[in-house]
């Protein structure tokens, strides 16, 4: 019996997240911290609620993560000029080399994940997954980009 596509996607996502988390840990950050840095590298300066939603975590969880990353010098909070109660999150100069290493890590993971697929199969896979994402209500804007995927 063939496995349902929903199971294959879900299990592949779990394995991909595990592989990502293990790889970025060698760079000194957790998987969620790495994802936040990558999202910030494209959409810097939004409020914490925006990033909590993008990472699918509770706002208090994101707040604690930003606290730790701010203490490590990777992020900084700035008052939102439009709402003095809100904080915008920004990268620091210290985080920029880390982001480059994270992008390299993502590119290598992408290559490893698609080993054995030719260029046409890779393109078809990306197109199919984008359609699935959009069918499930995904935002057409990517969470982040690497130099390899545009």
Image (spheres, rainbow, N blue to C red):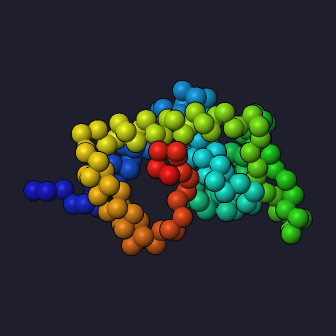
The residue that appears at 79% across and 57% down in the rendered structure is 88
Residue 43 in the figure: left or right of residue 22? right
Give the answer, above or below, for where 102 lies relative to 88.
above
Quarter assignment of residue 133: bottom left
Between 150 and 108, the one nearer to me in the picture: 150
How many numbered dots are placed on residues in this image? 0
Give the answer, above or below, for where 82 lies relative to 64.
below
Between 34 and 122, the one nearer to me in the picture: 122
Between 81 and 100, the one nearer to me in the picture: 100
Q: Quadrant of the N terminus?
A: bottom left
The residue that appears at 63% across and 53% down in the rendered structure is 42
Give the answer, above or below, for where 86 lies relative to 18.
below
The residue that appears at 36% across and 68% down in the rendered structure is 131
Q: Residue furthest left?
A: 1
Tell me residue 37's x, y (percent).
64, 45
Residue 36 in the figure: left or right of residue 16? right
The residue that appears at 39% across and 73% down in the rendered structure is 135
Q: Would residue 28 be seen by someone viewing this image from the given angle?
A: yes
Residue 82 in the figure: left or right of residue 37? right
Between 38 and 61, the one nearer to me in the picture: 38
Tell me residue 21's x, y (percent).
49, 37
Tell me residue 64's x, y (percent).
71, 47
Q: Would residue 30 be seen by someone viewing this image from the given angle?
A: no
């Amino acid at each position: 019996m063939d496995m349902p596509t929903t199971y294959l996607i879900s299990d592949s996502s779990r394995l991909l997240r595990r592989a990502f988390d293990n790889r970025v840990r060698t760079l000194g950050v957790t998987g969620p911290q790495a994802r936040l840095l990558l999202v910030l590298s494209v959409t810097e300066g939004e409020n914490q609620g925006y990033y909590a939603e993008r990472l699918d975590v509770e706002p208090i969880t994101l707040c604690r993560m930003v606290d730790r990353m701010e203490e490590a010098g990777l992020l900084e909070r700035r008052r939102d000029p439009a709402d003095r109660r809100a904080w915008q999150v920004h990268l620091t100069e210290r985080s920029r080399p880390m982001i480059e290493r994270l992008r390299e890590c993502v590119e290598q993971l992408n290559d490893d994940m698609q080993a054995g697929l030719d260029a046409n199969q890779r393109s078809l896979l990306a197109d199919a997954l984008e359609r699935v994402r959009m069918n499930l209500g995904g935002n057409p804007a990517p969470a982040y980009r690497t130099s390899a995927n545009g």
